[in-house]
Image (cartoon, rainbow, N blue to C red):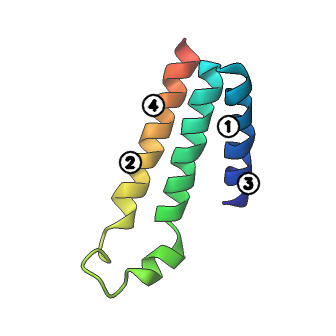
Amino acid sequence: IVLLISLIVVYARTYRQTRGRFSLGLLVIFSSFLFQEIFSSPLLSHLLEHTPFAVGFAGPIADTFRIIAYAIFLYISLE
């Protein structure tokens, strides 16, 4: 998670300097991977174990962020 946050900071700085679409795409991809890691974290499932969201909550959301990241990566690769 720390590495993903570091990459987000680096590409946010790069995007601010260059306003490049590729940097923006990578920023969104790394953010999606960060959310995917957060939602698939054992800590989150432990915090939600006594709530209605406990059963089956994190898996589909984490997969959705992964799919978004791959779709954006494909889009910026085809440009």
**Local crowd at mark 2 within 10 Å, few (<14), some, or many (≥20)?**
some
Tell me, yes or no, whether the two marked residues, 4 and 1, touch with CB atoms within 8 Å. no
**Are the residues at dot 4 and dot 2 in contact (C-beta closer than 8 Å)?**
no
The residue mark sitting in front, 4 or 1, is: 1
* Circle 3 residues within 10 Å: few <14, some 14–19, many ≥20: few
Which of marks 2 and 1 precedes in the sequence? 1
Mark sitting on residue 12: 1
Which amino acid type is shown beneath numbered disc 3?
Leu
* Mark closest to the chain's N terminus, 4 or 2: 2
Query: Which residue is at 71% across, 20% downward?
Result: 18
The image's mark for residue 3 is 3
Q: Residue at x 43, y 56 (%)?
A: 62
- Sequence order check: which comes first, mark 4 or mark 1? 1
Give how far apart the Cα atoms at labels 3 and 4 are: 22 Å
Return the x and y of residue 29 as percentages of the image width and height.
56, 38
Under mark 4, the amino acid is Ala
